[in-house]
Image: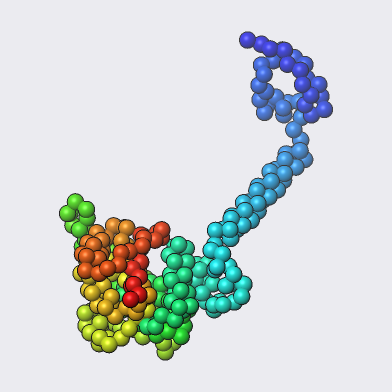
Amino acid sequence: MLKQTSFLFGGKNIHRNKPVYLTISYFYQHQTLRPMNILTLVNLIIINILILLGLSYFWSFYTYKLFKPWMWLENRKQKDFPKELTKLERKMKDKNLFYSIWFILKNIDQHNIEGKLAEVGVYKGETALILHHALPNRELLLFDDFSGTPKQVEREDCEGNMQTDIINSDGLTEEKMQALVNNHPKVIIKAGEYKTTFATLEQEEFAFVSIDGNFYENTKTALEFFYPRLAQGGSLLIHDYNHKWEGVQNAVHEFLQAIPENFTPLPDMYGSIVITKNKL
């Protein structure tokens, strides 16, 4: 069905019995599209794309700043922590975990909770660097095998089936970990089996311990060793509680039956929890 169409295009008044659509060939036949017009159109499109990308970038940057904790931003303004900690905050993917650890350590420092820092299961070294740079004057003990090679491990899923996982530490060896902290004398590496390395620290006191054991036995061994040596007001951070490592949950549930405290879940990527020891 034909419809009478009248419109102005390219400076020409077109008034014909034509379908409401017009093809590109029709435009070219009537010389309504010239090279300069096409080039101008392309330039305008590119400019608009660049403007949109710029606005998107600055909007993302603005909203990102909005969701940083106020206390962190205030402390950064006052330069209350080393620039290395700011670099870690920018690079770390799991911001919720970063800020959670930072707040716990800040509280430990403000309330003068005595004791050393420790991490059981160093993985790629991210958490160890946060601990070191947040409280550089505290002794930090790092427990792992530091073999630098991926580990193939077996775990039991919720249905009781065995699953194979690969734990890749990105080749983190004892030497590489020391290099990450510039061979700082306060950072002490304890390479080897957990039970063996724990045995040399019977008389120590700890203010904060990060436990990333992945498995039931590792988590249970760490909880049983460090909780009695945790200062009042000190905290244990257990990774992967609300994640795929069911052995971690089982170890925590069993352990909680023997202590008066409960845990606080964190909204980080892999579902960490915190146990803070009650003050008498």
Could you say where residue 238 lies in the image, as x and y percent from the top left? 32, 67
Query: Would you identify the image quadrant in which residue 82 lies?
Result: bottom right
State the count of labels.
0
Q: Nearer the viewer, residue 37 or 61?
A: 61
Give left or right: position of 112 versus 223. Answer: right
Residue lying at 37% horizontally and 75% vertically, measured from the top left: 233
Q: Position of residue 267 (x, y in %)?
A: 41, 58
Question: Considering depth in this image, is 269 or 151 the residue closer to the camera?
Answer: 269
Question: Which residue is located at x 35 percent, y 66 percent?
Answer: 274
Residue that lies at the very extreme toward the bottom in this rendered image: 185
> Nearest the camera: 67 or 10?
67
Name the image quarter holding residue 190: bottom left
Q: Quadrant of the N terminus?
A: top right
Q: Residue at x 54, y 77 (%)?
A: 81
Residue 176 appears in view: no
Q: Is residue 16 visible?
A: yes
Provide residue 85's location: percent of width, then percent of height. 51, 74
On-image quarter of the C terminus: bottom left
The image shows residue 123 at horizontal and vertical percentages of 35, 71
Is residue 5 toward the left or the right of residue 151 in the image? right
* Residue 245 vertical position relative to residue 21 in the rendered view, above or below: below
Residue 237 occupies quadrant: bottom left
